Image (cartoon, coloured by chain):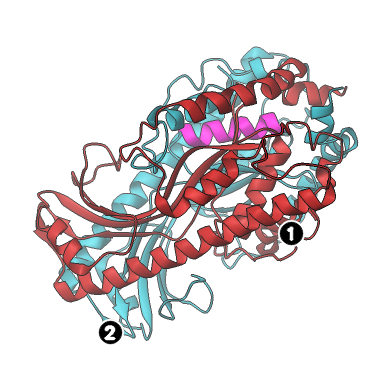
Chain colours: A cyan, B red
Amino acid sequence: MTEVKTNQLGENKVTAMEKNFSQWKAQCLNKMDLSKKGIVDRHIEHVVSLLNDTDEFFTTSSCSGRIILIDRTPQSDVQKKNCIWLFVSHKKCTSDDLMTGLAKSSRDAVLKFEPFVLHVQCRRLEDAQLMHAVAVNSGFRNSGLTVSKTGKIITAVRGTHSLEVPLSHNGKLLAGFEYISFLTDIANQKMEENLKRIQRFYQNIESALMAQKLQFPDLPSPGDPQHLPNRLSNGKGAERETSVYKRRRKREHQTDCCHGDESSSVQELGDCLDLFT
Amino acid sequence: MTEVKTNQLGENKVTAMEKNFSQWKAQCLNKMDLSKKGIVDRHIEHVVSLLNDTDEFFTTSSCSGRIILIDRTPQSDVQKKNCIWLFVSHKKCTSDDLMTGLAKSSRDAVLKFEPFVLHVQCRRLEDAQLMHAVAVNSGFRNSGLTVSKTGKIITAVRGTHSLEVPLSHNGKLLAGFEYISFLTDIANQKMEENLKRIQRFYQNIESALMAQKLQFPDLPSPGDPQHLPNRLSNGKGAERETSVYKRRRKREHQTDCCHGDESSSVQELGDCLDLFT
């Protein structure tokens, strides 16, 4: 064993992580949903089910994307501290919905579109890499991994498709109906694009699982009750995906004006998407 | 060696990664800066220098944060494709700056505040975990890791402190001077908060490197010409940070309305920040 590997996770930790994953998954899926809404959003039920039916993944939190109008103290650094929700919708809305919400504002109201977000706990680092590649390739370009001390490996699937428009100050509306109507259209377009990306994400996960199945035909399908924890632990993990991720999207990178080799970020993404090709 | 480790990175790959890191770093730092601006933003020169003077890290791209006014085709999915920059500033701006920029709009102008973003290539996974913990603890809550097929481990440091306000449609301005003036104040406040977080990030990195130095007093300081590639490769990597990350911030989570155990996201972050305590 190389020193590097010892440092990266530690032998005991790796074993513990493998054992812990199944326990964590069982605990998480048996727990009550403590979110405000209390259930998985309708638009992503199929994504959550697909992932929770595998042995490599389970979801720890999710939001399909929402149009939200919040009222908060001016200059509040912490965006959701002491803020009131004037309106929230996980589907398209109307200008009247927003005007009705805005009428209740007594502080600073802000209209936001928050795209799909999903936290997926992954059995192993290679599973997290795969999930990350699928997420980025589906348009969720702010996705990234977290590896905790206790061995939890989580891929956060995050989009960049947002909107954040201040609309009132100390309860005084700063925009007219025409502008609110224009914003409603934009928020609804973002919602539509967001749902397309979720669908693309779902199809890409399905394809990845299918490619895996084709490569290892003796393995059960996702959701099959047969236990599959080691089905990919044959040392060929890095080869298991074939053509699924060959279509790439160039990242329109946030840093294109600043320090950096213009190609490096795309290269970075290319590497990432190329993980299993 | 466990099967899991073979799958995670592969013995040859790990060795190659360790060797490659120094080569990648040398290549990257010797390359011409191909970004539009061509130099590192003034506000983050000290952060970039601090990281590039270590043996565990180097930066591949960065932007200190900017107020930007872009003009793009309506309903363009790809935000930066075929868009024109009407105005960009890496420091505070005035309403007149924005009004002058808006006067040039012929399509759909959007005012954005884009916070600090930094891509840091890391020698080992534990270095990336540390960088991620520092980033999140400094307020950059959308940070995450990428692990590529070729062994590049990159922590993307990303904030959530954004603004995205559509302001014209087909060249027609949709808002008055009073509203633009209000938005200018908000964008400038976000710029100020962003700079505070960069400073906090810088101090937290310094503290982390100092804690490491205190724990291994025979080791040279960051920036010391003495070569340090294996200074933490003694199997104690996971113990090297002591009290630096004990102060935690609860994440005001994007998914607090939706599916999820309310505590799980905070727990996830807690684990992350707790990495080296």
Label 2: element kind: strand
Asked if residue A40 can be seen in this view, the reply is yes
Q: Is residue A59 left or right of residue A124?
A: left
Residue A205 part of the magenta segment: no
For disc 1, the marked residue is: B244
Picture quadrant where residue A49 is located: top right
Q: Quadrant of residue A71?
A: bottom left
Relative image position of residue A237 (x, y in whole percent): 70, 20
Please name the residue shown 41% across and 44% down the image. B40
Query: Is residue A198 depicted above or below B268 in this figure?
Result: above
User: x, y percentage for residue B219?
Assistant: 79, 42
Which segment is the magenta one? Answer: A125-137
- Please tell me how crowded label 2 is: few (under 14), some (14-19), or many (20+) other residues with Cα within 10 Å: some
Specify the subunit that label 2 lies on: A
Secondary element at tag 1: loop
Q: Residue at x 65, y 13 (%)?
A: A215
Q: In the rendered structure, the residue with mark 1 lies on which chain? A: B
Q: Is residue A63 above or below residue A180?
A: above
Q: Position of residue B103 (x, y in %)?
A: 9, 58
Residue, disc 2: A172
Contact check, label 2 and label 1, Cβ < 8 Å: no
Q: Position of residue B61 (x, y in %)?
A: 46, 38
